Amino acid sequence: MLKELITKIASMQSVGQPYFPPGLFPSYRSNPLIGYHRSDTTMFFPAIIAFTLQSVRDKVEDTTIRQEIDAIVEKVVVNYPLFQNKDGLKTYNFWQTRPSKHFPNGYLFRHFEHFRIPDDVDDTALAYLTTSPTPEELRWLKEKLPLHANGTRLWIRNTYPEYRSLRAYSTWFGKNMYIEFDACVLSNLLYCIFRYQLPRNQHDEDSLTYIRSVIEKDRYLTEPFRCAHQYPRTPLIIYHVVRLLAAFDPPQLQPIREKLIRDTTALLQKAEHPMDRVILATSLLRLGERPPRIPIENYTAADFKGFYFFIAGLLTAYEHPLLYRLAINPLMHMHWICEAHNWTLLTEYQCLWESRK
C-alpha cells in the first residue's frame, strides 16, 4: 500500500506543466462561497510534502520506497531558489520572488502591492528542515528571527490581551509587517529550532508558552482562528502541536500532553470529514495511542472534497477591531488545496500505523 501511495504522489509532481515548474506539486487557491478557483504556484505544498515524507522515511523498510521518497524531495528542493528572499537572504516566501509573483494567475490581487507578502517563518522553517543548512546559515537564522519577534520593533495587537507582552516569534519577516502569533506556524518553527539544537532564548520560551496556553485554556477548541490565522481549525492545530510534542517532548508542553490525548480522542469520535479523521488519528498515533483503524485503502479523491490545510485571511492583516472581527468570516478566506498533499497525509498515517504494530 505504501508503494502505491508514494507512486501516486510521485506521478503528481510537475514535469513542466503550465504554472508549475518541474518538481512542484499542483495546488490551488479557492473560495467556494464566491466561486473562486485559481492555480497557485507556491513553495508551501511542495515543501510540506517533502518534509512529511522525510519525517516518515526511516519508518519505511522497503529500500525502493525510500529511494522514491528521496527522488521526490530532491525534485522539490531544487525549486527553493525561486522562492528565496529577493535580496538573496536565506529566508523564503510563499510565492516566487524574482520577479515577484504574488497571487499568481489571478486577475485582480496580483496587480496590487498591498497583497505582496513578505517572507515568512513557516516556509523558511520548511526549507531549512528539508535541506542541509550549514552551521553559519543556522546561526544567521537564529539571529534573524528575534528582529521580527513581538516587542522588537512592533507589538502585537490582534491577539488576546494576556499574550500581548509575550516576546514570541511572529509569522512574518518584513521590517514593517504587523506581528502575528500562529500556534501552527510556531510549532513548525520550533520544530526546526529543536531539530538543529539551536540555542534557545526568551522568544522560544514565550512561543512555547503561547502554544501551551491556547490549549490549556481551550481557546484552540472554541476560537481556533484567533489561535492560528493560517491554520484556523482545531484538527490542524492539534496535528501541528502534536508533531512538535511527539518529536522533542519540550518540558513546556508536557503539561498539555494528556489533555491533547483526551481532546483529540473526543474529536475523532465525532469528526465528520474523512481527512480530519486521518490527521486526528495520526496525532494520536504520535502520542502513543492506538485509535481505531481508518480504512484509507478505500479513500479516493472524493474524500478530499471540502478539506483544506491552509488559508489566507484577506482581512487578517488589519488590526482595527472591527475589521479583525470581520476577518473570521469565511467570505474573507482563501483556501489552499493540494491533492498530492492529501495523499501524503494518508502515507504518513499508514507509516505511523504500521510502525506501531
Image (cartoon, rainbow, N blue to C red):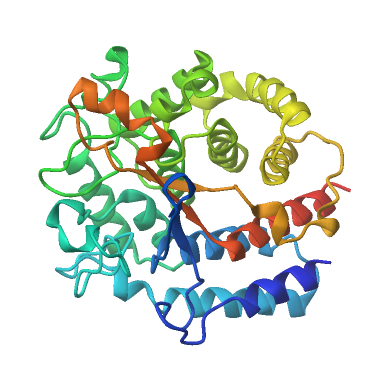
Residue 70: where, in percent of width, then height? Answer: 60, 76
Query: Taking 163 as reference, is 332 above or below it?
Result: below
Seen from the viewer's position, the closer of residues 111 and 27 is 111
Quadrant for residue 138, please give it: bottom left
Return the x and y of residue 201 as percentages of the image width and height.
30, 34
**Which residue is painted at 54% across and 48% down in the image?**
308
Q: In which quarter of the image is residue 206?
A: top left
| Residue 255 in the figure: left or right of residue 282 | left
Q: Can residue 54 be seen in this view?
A: no
Q: Which quadrant of the rendered structure holds the N terminus?
A: bottom right
Residue at figure coordinates x 53%, y 16% from the top left: 218
Q: Is residue 22 left or right of residue 283?
A: left
**Quarter location, residue 245:** top right
How many numbered marks have been drawn onto this rendered protein structure? 0
- Apparent side of residue 111 relative to residue 290 in the rendered image (left or right): left
Q: In front: 71, or 337?
A: 337
246, above or below 264, in the image: below
Image coordinates of residue 234 in percent, x first then y, are 56, 30
The reply to whether residue 240 is visible in this rendering is yes
In percent of the image, x 72 and y 40: which residue is there?
277
Q: Position of residue 239 (x, y in %)?
A: 59, 39
Specify the farthest residue to the bottom.
16
Residue at 12% from the left image edge and 32% from the top image edge: 154
